Image (tube, grey):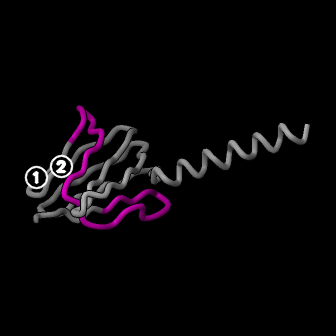
Amino acid sequence: MASLIVDVVSAEEAIFAGEAKFVSLPGESGELGILPGHTPLISRIRPGTLKIVRPDNSEEVVFVAGGILEVQPGTLTVLAGIAVVEAELAMLAAQAHAARMLKNVRR
């Protein structure tokens, strides 16, 4: 099965590096779907959700706050100022909720 090598990088760290059979993301002019063999492309991306489908059909979801997309034969690179994996967002939200609850209990 054909796949893409995908790299998602924020200003602070590498967020994802691996293979994918499909990637969807919010392009400047609308939603983009990238499959292996896609025509080379450079585009700005809007804030939103980047979905990476791995060859085993598992998914990785990353929130990006805008950036640049580059598609070359066999590779897809996203350079984002801010990028956060969905699981980390859920953890951060849970921590914020726990801090609010603790603050209310102390009152």
- Pick whichever, 15 or 99, lies toward us: 99
Q: Quadrant of residue 6?
A: bottom left
CA distance separating discs 2 and 1:
6 Å
Mark 2 highlights which residue?
34
Quarter occupied by the C terminus = top right
Q: Is residue 5 above or below residue 30?
A: below
**Where is residue 45 drawn, in percent x and y?**
31, 42
| Category of crowding for the residue at label 1, using alpha-carbon neighbours closer than 10 angstroms: few (below 14), some (14–19), many (at least 20) | some
Q: Is residue 54 above or below residue 42?
A: below
Indicate whether residue 52 is drawn in magenta. no
Q: Are marks 2 and 1 in contact (CB under 8 Å)?
A: yes
Q: Which disc is residue 7 wearing? A: none
**Where is residue 98 drawn, in percent x and y?**
72, 46
Question: Label 2 is placed on what type of residue?
Answer: Ile
Question: Label 1 is placed on what type of residue?
Answer: His
Mark 1 highlights which residue?
38
Provide the residue span drawn in magenta. Answer: 7-32
Indicate whether residue 27 is drawn in magenta. yes
**Where is residue 95 drawn, in percent x and y?**
67, 49
Name which residue lies at 24% across and 32% down.
Answer: 30
16 on left or right of 40: right
Element type at mark 2: strand
Element type at mark 1: loop
Q: Quadrant of residue 37?
A: bottom left
Name which residue lies at 58% across and 52% down.
Answer: 91
Give the residue at the far top of this rendering: 29
Name which residue lies at 32% across and 54% down.
Answer: 59
Quarter occupied by the N terminus = bottom left
Name which residue lies at 20% across and 49% down.
Answer: 42
Q: Is residue 82 above or below residue 7?
A: above
